[in-house]
Each structure stands twice: as structure tokens, then as C-alpha cells.
Image (spheres, grey):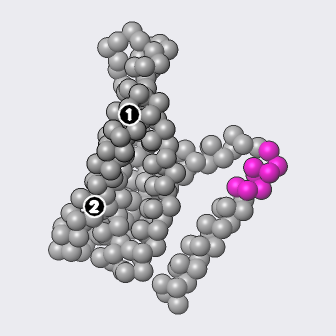
Amino acid sequence: MHLWQNLRGTVRLFFVLEKLVLWRHCHFDDCEAHGPGEQHRDQSTAQMILVGDGLHNFLDGLLIGAAFLTDFELGVVTTIAVVAHEIPQEIGDVAVLLAAGYSKSKVMFLNVLVSFTTVVGGIIAWGWLAEAEALRPYVIAVAASSFLYVAVADLIPGLHRKVGGFASLMQVIFIGLGVVVIYFSHSSMHG
């Protein structure tokens, strides 16, 4: 398998998917594409958050399942990485849903419901990829490229918008810390 070719291809796929999601047509005069309709924007954003997060969590479950089937240590490291990126994302999702007018109890219910798709993805991966061993590298390549795409398309540009000395120092420290964690994770798995 040519992992690099799979990563390049799936990164392009994520770019096209994001363009298709962002390029949508609205039938209302008061929407994100055509005007400053705050309530409509909040509602459509909340709906997109729920659908997108459900799909995202499902794919996280597939990734975790594929990682555990490949190697136990890889599964543990993958689970830790997924949990680490999910915590701030879920906090942001809660804020968006509250701003859209959902009650706290509805936000919590919807968040738990959408998070359950991770379990569904993990169960499907465990059952499906246990038999389809040849597909595991492709599932992992798609998952890895999604992480890379989010980093390149969203996180790095966001980091460049904060140019102050302290913010830049903290960014370098946390990126370095991430590299150290990856190094020791890799060393413990292969050393």
C-alpha cells in the first residue's frame, strides 16, 4: 500500500467535501449566504454542528476500532488523541447549541446522542474490519488525513492570526509538547 498516495488523495477528498458543504444554496432572504439573519444562522449552524459532529464521531469510532485491531498500543494512543481533540470541540458545540436557543437539557441530550455514534462506529469497525484486514490501512489513512486536513485548513491558519509574543511562544511550546508525546508514544510501541 502506498500510504502517502492514500493520504494525498483523501486530503483532496476532504477539501472537496468541505467546499461542497460550504457552497450551499439558501431559499430564504434571511440566511448565512444572503443576509444577517441571526436566528436563522444560529439554527442552521446548530443543525450543521449536530450532523457534522455525528459523522465525525462515527468516523472517530471507526478509527479507534481499526487502530485497536491493528495494534493494542496504537488503539490506546489513538483513543487518547481522539479524546484530547473531542473535549474542546464538544465545549464549542455546547456553546453553539446554547446560542441557537436550545435548553441546557436538550443540549446535553443531543450531545450524548450524537456522541453515541462513536460507539456505533467502533462496533462496526470491530465487526467489519476484523474480517476485512486488508481495509484497515485504508481506514487509518482516511482518518489520519482527516486529522491532517483539519490541522492544515483550520488550526494552522487560526494560529497564524495570533501573532503576539506570548501567544506565539505558547503555540511553539504546545506544538513541541505534541511532538514529544508522539515520539514517546512511538518509542514505547516500537522500543
**Element at label 1:** loop
Quadrant hosting residue 39: top left
Specify the amino acid type for callout 1. Answer: Ser
Q: Can residue 142 be seen in this view?
A: yes
| x and y, in percent, of residue 165 in the image | 82, 49
Horizontal relation, residue 172 to residue 126: left or right: right
Q: Can residue 5 be seen in this view?
A: no
Specify the amino acid type for callout 2. Answer: Val
Q: In this rendered view, identify the residue nearer to me: 42 or 170.
A: 42
The single residue placed furthest to the bottom in the displayed view is 191
Horizontal relation, residue 116 to residue 171: left or right: left
* Depicted 1 relative to depicted 105: above or below: below
Q: In this rendered view, identify the residue nearer to me: 80 or 10.
A: 80
Q: Residue at x 40, y 38 (%)?
A: 104
> Which disc number belongs to residue 88?
none
> Which disc number belongs to residue 103?
1
